Structure formats: C-alpha cells, structure tokens
Amino acid sequence: MSKKTHSTWGGRFSKKPAELMVRFSESVSFDQRLAPYDIFCSKAHAAMLCKIGILKKSERDAIHKGLDAIALRVKKGQLKWSTKLEDVHMNIEAALLKYTPAAAKLQTARSRNDQVVTDMRLFFKDICKDIITVLTKLQVGLLQLAKVNQDICIPAYTHLQRAQPISLAHQLLAYIEMFNRDHMRLKIVIDHANVCPLGSGAVAGTTLPIDREFVAKYLDFVDTKGRPQLTQNSVDAVADRDLYIEFVTACALCGTHLSRIAEDFILWNSTEFNYVMLPDSFTTGSSLMPHKKNPDSLELIRGKSARIQGQLQILLTLVKGLPFSYNRDLQEDKRPVFDACDEILISLQVMEKTLTKIKVNRDVCAIAVADVNLLATDLVDFLVEKGAPFREAHRAVGRLVALAEKEGVMINELKTIHTRRIHKLLDGDWKNVFNTEYALNKRDKIGMPGPRQVRRQINRWNKKLGAH
Ligand code: ARG
C-alpha cells in the first residue's frame, strides 16, 4: 500500500487526508478512554476468529499477548496516541501491528461501526455501576443526616410559602426516594446495555462463519442464566443510539434532582432562612466582601445540571435527522456521554461531602415551625372531626386567620367568645390543636411525617442501603 495514503483504508485513495481534515475528524483525543473496552473486545474477537479457524492458535496468542502489553502501556499513560490514526480503534490496531503481523487479520468480519457500539455498551455497564456507588453513598449520607437530626422540625413549603410542619428527616427521606428512582433508571440502562452488537459488521453482518454467541459470552453480555444476549438486527445495531440517550437522560434527571436539593440548601443557608450552616470546606469567600461565605459547591451543582441537560439535547438533535444506519455524525455522540457521566459523578460526590458536613440551626428551625398558621389546616380537620362539612370548616378557619391578621395576633390568641361567633364548634378545646408534636403524632399513616412513620422509613432505608 502506498505510504501516501491512510494505512487502514487507503486502498482506493491516492492522496492522504489534508492536515486540516485530520485535525477535524480525529476522535482519539476523547475516545481513548474506551481503550480498555476496545482491547477486551479485540481479545474476544481474536479468540472467536481462532475458534472458527481464521486465526491460528499461535496468531491468537500473539494477538492476546500484544493486546495485554498495549493495555498495560495505556494504563501507565505510555501509549502514544496519534490523531493521524483517527480513533482509539485504529491506534490500537496500529500499535498491535508492531507486536505481531497477525494484527492484520484482526479486523476480519468486524467494522469500527460494530466495534465502537460494543465498546460503548461495555463502558455503560461499568460507568452506571460507578454512578450507582456514589449515588448510594449520597443516600447513606442523607440518611445519616436524617438520623442525627430526627427531632428537628421545619415548615414544609408549597409555593415557597410555609405550609405544614414536618420533620427535617421527612424531607431528607424525600430526597432519598428521589435518588432511588435514579438508581432504578441506571439499572435499566445497565440492562439495556447488556446486549452484544459485535458481528453486525459495518451494517450487514459478514459472509464469514463467525460465532456471535461465543463473543457475547466472552464479553459477559449474558442474562442471569448465563445465556448470550445478541442484537437481532445488524442495521439497528450500528444505527441505534437509544442507550446513549437513555444514559444521559438518567444523568440529566439525576442532575436535576441534585439541583433541586442544592436550591433548598442554598435557601436554607441564606441569612433569611438560616436553617443550616454549610461547611467551610465547600463554600468560598468573596474577593471584595469580607463577610461573605458563598454556597459555591451547591451553586455549581445547580449550574452543572444545566450542562448535563444540554448534553442530552445534543444527542437528541444529533440522531433525529440521521438516515439509517451509521453516519460519521455519530462520532459526536461520545463527548456528551463522557461529559454527562463525569459531571454527574463529581456532582454527586460534592453533594455528599457538602451535606454530610452541614450544621442544622435547631433554634431557628424551632422558631419557624412554631408558626401557628402551619396548623390552620389541622384546625379544619378538628372541625371536620366534630361534624362540620369540610368546605364550611375551611371557610371558618379562613375567616379566623383574617380576623387574627386584622387584630395583629396569632390565631390561637383569639378569644373563644369571638371564635364561637365564626363557627359554633370553635369552642372548648379548639386551641389544643396548636401543638406541633401533637400535630405530627396524628400524621401516622404510611408516607406521612409522623415520628413513628419517619422512624419506620429510616429503618427501611437502613436495611435497603445496608447503612447501620
Ligand atoms: N470513530 C468512529 C466513531 O466514533 C468509529 C466508527 C467509524 N466508522 C467509520 N466508518 N468511519 O463513530
């Protein structure tokens, strides 16, 4: 083959790609992180080619030895990546050729189109497990925070207005629930990734007698019974990017969840709320205002969630107008995936470290939750229990709130002689309602913030997360 052309596909070309084109089209600067998976796939493929008689045993062994040596060099950062060789696949093939001439047979019955999607599926299976690990750590941290602050109550908010009393633990447990759904979504991605596309070739398989089941088993694309799982359509296998979109969706949603929590704690850390104090180690000062302690870690988590959402948009747009099957556009699928996974991994870790070192201002929370208006709804329930229709009770308590506002007192400071005029049942023991502890104890059905229920939930999550 002429030295003037590209070593891998240069047969029909008489000139090399322009330097500008090389720079424009290379992906090795970012897809080199797929190297361990690419090497694993190549070992599986070589083993299969030997099984079907295309490689001699000695050739397979030389290829395996060479690939192991390359893997080690990659790990130590010693492999020199060349943009002239476009991508991770061709760099590894070229490196292997220096170990054994058998490398020239390795691309038999294989294309970079099925190779890259196989590498990515292996990547997804691994990275989802890593994300689940840090996600679980954050859940354990939240659970710990719930446990040590179990007796602290705060107002629950709707419309960012004080609504009803809850324990802080109840809200922290809400976050744990939310992250559990992220966990389940990532598990689904692992499941969907667990299907082997190798053997689909460029788009229409191969005429050679390959053994796809063997390769799938070698690469651990198997179900719970150890049966190989194979993609069922070669065109779909090289064109499909659903998995990438599902993965980044899971990251984007998890990022959005982190962002909402960040927002809660940014508010609670403000002087106006002052429910919590963030740790020095995850806040920063102002270069101008000496008194400032800014919640930067949480603000960055909130900001990065926008970036992850953006990556999802890139993928959806990338795929939407593409004719079947593989198009080079698809090379642009990797950076959004890698960026989403890197940002979600670090955001989860930062959230865990920030929240587990938080201090709760118990006195400020106690004052906030003592706001008697938080129990206005409980007074409606009191009237209902005494036989008043709900709408009538709601209106009466509304009038009570308005009267208290007019008089400049709290509702439980109104005199019974006046309240009796608003509703005849606002008599006798109606003021007993205004007791937070009593109010919470009455909220004792599954999912409610009563202390017994919260304890049950803490125990449930203790078991589920293995966090004693
Ligand atoms: N680097 C390419 C990608 O990431 C690999 C597949 C290239 N296939 C091709 N026929 N040029 O999409």
Image (cartoon, helix red, strand yellow):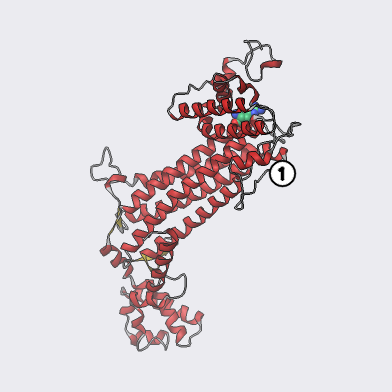
149 or 190, which is in the foreground? 190
Q: Quadrant of residue 243?
A: top right
Please state if 101 lies on the left or on the right of 157 as rendered: right
Please state if 229 lies on the left or on the right of 122 as rendered: right
Q: Quadrant of residue 163?
A: bottom left
Residue lying at 33% horizontally and 70% vertically, measured from the top left = 371
Q: Is mark 1 within 8 Å of ligand 1?
A: no
Residue type at mark 1: give it: Gln
Q: Is residue 307 visible?
A: no
Residue lying at 35% horizontally and 85% vertically, measured from the top left = 418
Residue 54 image position (x, y, % from top left)? 69, 28
Q: Where on the image, by quarter, is ligand 1?
A: top right
128 or 75, which is in the foreground? 75
236 or 306, which is in the foreground? 236
Disc 1 is placed on an element classified as loop
Residue beneath disc 1: 232
Residue lying at 48% horizontally and 21% vertically, measured from the top left = 80
Question: Quick one: which residue is furthest to the front in this view?
Answer: 57
